[in-house]
Amino acid sequence: MNRRLIYVCLCITLLSSFSCSKEYDDEIKNLQFAFDMGAAYDALAGKYSGAWWINGEKVDDGSSSVYLEPSGVKNCDMLTFGPFGFPSESVVQLLFPDTDISELSIELVSGGFIEVQRIGYSESMIYYLNGETYAQHRLQIKDKTGHSFVLVLVYVPSESTVSLDFTSQTLSIGLVVKQIVIIDEIGNETVRELNPEMKLTFIGSRKND
């Protein structure tokens, strides 16, 4: 009986050691994977040059670059556009077809960025999602007569996607706009539902300049 008891105890000890060792190895692999993804991201943050599509049609209004930058918040980054990185003119032309686009001065307001949160990794990808219920992007529009208003694009995060491919060094953005808000010069707001929705797509590759 004593020999059998000793044998059972020995087996339990060996199995426990094997289990702990496996958990330790898995933990090391996970840490290494997270380190590799972080290092790859740090190397690829910056400017991406490419093209925009609106509802599946490529736009040609000079908007060609997007910046992916750290936001200062853990696991969150920013998409910044600058004056020529977002298809502002094409968006306004589609939403207000009776407006002569040549008479508009369009600029991004509220910092001109969208904050996105890292939600997952694969061997070559980082996936993002906006952490807010609705993300907003504001455009200041002014014509030559001095009339101005703010156009707010309201994105639906659950239907919008952002991903960064390490292998091809490609940034892909898909934004879905179902609602816009028009704010006049005295602050009155008009909400307009888009049916069908507006789909904005950007695909760009990493640039060092």
Image (cartoon, rainbow, N blue to C red):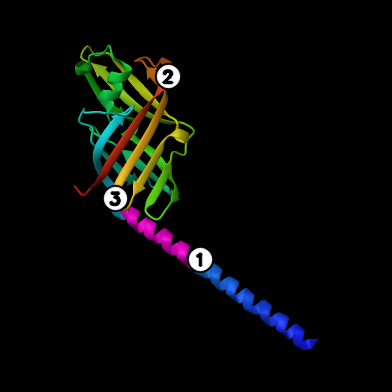
The residue tagged 1 is 26
Amino acid type, label 3:
Ser
Q: Nearer the viewer, residue 63 or 150?
A: 63
Vertical position of residue 197 compared to residue 7: above or below: above
State yes or no: residue 41 in magenta. Answer: yes
- The outermost residue toward the right is 1
Q: Residue at x 35, y 47 (%)?
A: 164
The residue tagged 3 is 168
Disc 2: CA contacts within 10 A as few (<14), some (14-19) or many (>=20): few
How far is the residue under mark 3 from the one under mark 1?
28 Å
Residue 136 rendering spot, x and y as whole percentages: 40, 29
Q: Nearer the viewer, residue 79 or 58?
A: 58
Location of residue 61 by image quarter: top left
Vertical position of residue 154 compared to residue 27: above or below: above
The residue tagged 2 is 195
Q: Which residues are magenta?
A: 27-42
How far is the residue under mark 3 from the one under mark 2?
35 Å
Element assignment for label 3: loop
Quarter of the image for the N terminus: give it. Answer: bottom right
Secondary structure predominantly adopted by residues drawn in magenta: helix
- Pointers 2 and 1 in contact (CB under 8 A)? no
Amino acid type, label 1:
Asp
- Left or right relative to 119: residue 60: left
Residue 209 rendering spot, x and y as whole percentages: 19, 47
